[in-house]
Image (tube, helix red, strand yellow):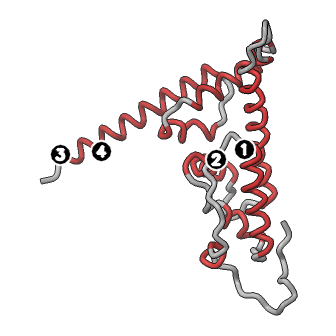
Amino acid sequence: MNNHGNDGGGVQGLMTLANFFKVNLPKFKGTTSPTEADTWFQAMEQALQAQVVPEGQCVEFATYLPTGEASHWWQGVRHLMQQGDDYITWNAFREEFYKKYFLTSATTAKELELLQLKQGTMFSRMCQGTPGDYEEWKCIKYEGGLRSDIFSSVGPMEIRTFSELVNKSKVAEECVKKAAAERGSHKGSFP
């Protein structure tokens, strides 16, 4: 995204987040539908261009709109991508977004669709394919059943080895239990 100038209508002041939100863009909760993910991303990109948001602010503005699972995903990815005070480029954000919500979603949706087929001896290629393919599918299914507090810890890691994912989930669950116990013990210490 290249937003270095203005629209030719005179000098434009700095874009503020408050002004950007006046566009009333939709929130993004995360999805298994590649069409929904792509529609949100395209709307965001058009709004950033129309509002002439500088390159250094595009990711900052856009990432105020993900909520729930999508917000947890972004927090983990941002932590891995952020290097010092450098901003994350729009192209880097686009690549991570589509890697998470479009390519994987499209693959997963098709695999789940294949699993629904009940025609003679037809089975999903995931069950007939290489063990590595099946391993990834098991991980995706397992993540889908995790509580949100545990998924927020292990989901951004995108672990695709089933035994490792189960172990990390157990560790995350123990951390959640320990934090809850500590919060509970502090409540009783005040009059």
Identify residue for label 3. Answer: 188
Q: Position of residue 11 (x, y in %)?
A: 79, 91
Kindly identify the residue that appears in the image at 54 percent across and 29 percent down: 145
Of the two numbered discs 2 and 3 in the rendering, the one whose residue sits closer to the viewer = 2
Q: Secondary structure at mark 4?
A: helix
Crowd band around label 2 with a 10 angstrom C-alpha radius: few (<14), some (14–19), many (20+): many
Of the two numbered discs 1 and 4 in the rendering, the one whose residue sits closer to the viewer = 1
Question: Foreground residue, 146 or 172?
Answer: 146
Question: Foreground residue, 165 or 111?
Answer: 111
Kindly identify the residue that appears in the image at 54 percent across and 37 percent down: 151
Q: Are marks 2 and 3 in contact (CB under 8 Å)?
A: no
Residue 101's mark? 1
Left or right: where 189 falls relative to 55: left
Q: Position of residue 47 (x, y in %)?
A: 75, 69
Q: Are marks 1 and 4 in contact (CB under 8 Å)?
A: no
In the rendered structure, which amino acid carries the disc numbered 2? Gly
Farthest residue, direction top: 121
Sooner in the amino-acid sequence: mark 1 or mark 4: 1
Q: CA distance from mark 2 to mark 1?
A: 7 Å
Identify residue for label 4. Answer: 183
Crowd band around label 4 with a 10 angstrom C-alpha radius: few (<14), some (14–19), many (20+): few
Q: Secondary structure at mark 3?
A: loop
Of the two numbered discs 3 and 1 in the rendering, the one whose residue sits closer to the viewer = 1
Q: CA distance from mark 1 to mark 4?
A: 35 Å
Kindly identify the residue that appears in the image at 12 percent across and 53 percent down: 191
Sooner in the amino-acid sequence: mark 3 or mark 1: 1
Identify residue for label 2. Answer: 30
Crowd band around label 1 with a 10 angstrom C-alpha radius: few (<14), some (14–19), many (20+): many
Q: CA distance from mark 4 to mark 3?
A: 9 Å
Residue 3's mark? none
Sooner in the amino-acid sequence: mark 4 or mark 3: 4
